[in-house]
Image (cartoon, rainbow, N blue to C red):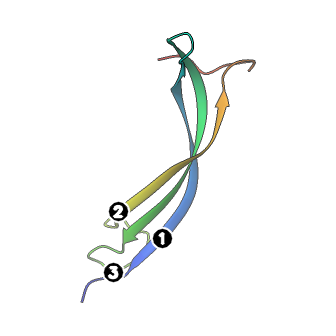
Amino acid sequence: MGNPYYVKFGRTKEITNSKQTDSSKNDQNIAPVVRTMAFIRILSHGPDGQIKTNDDFDVSTFTKAISELSGEGMQNPPFQF
């Protein structure tokens, strides 16, 4: 029988662009945003059977955007790619 799994929960932020479409004007606007992502990682204990060692590996990862903050109006807005 294999080694058990363990779960890690967390949040991370990323700077990215958000594309907004105005269908009435047939126009697209790209704006920089800071997106907060929540994640769940399912990890294996690895061959040594010990938790949180270098041989542990991801079995699966799930992510979801939980908030998005526009760069407009910020003192140091995110750069645009």
Amino acid marked by disc 2: Asp
Q: Is residue 12 above or below residue 39?
A: above
N-term mark: 1 or 2: 1
x and y percentages locating residue 38 in the rendered image: 56, 52
Q: Residue at x 31, y 82 (%)?
A: 3
**Residue matched to label 3:** 49
Helix, strand or loop at mark 1: strand
x and y percentages locating residue 6 in the rendered image: 44, 74
Q: Is residue 39 above or below residue 30?
A: below
N-term mark: 1 or 3: 1
Q: Residues within 10 Å of mark 1 (few under 14, many from 20)?
A: few
15 with respect to 69 (left or right): left
N-term mark: 3 or 2: 3
**Residue matched to label 1:** 7
x and y percentages locating residue 36 in the rendered image: 60, 42
Q: Residues within 10 Å of mark 2 (few under 14, many from 20)?
A: some
Q: What's the distance in space between the residues labelled 3 and 2, CA to CA?
A: 14 Å
17 with respect to 4 (left or right): right
Q: Is residue 62 above or below residue 49?
A: above
Amino acid marked by disc 3: Gly
Q: Residues within 10 Å of mark 3 (few under 14, many from 20)?
A: some
Closer to the eye: label 3 or 2: 2
Closer to the eye: label 1 or 3: 1
Q: What's the distance in space between the residues labelled 1 and 2, CA to CA?
A: 10 Å
**Residue matched to label 2:** 58
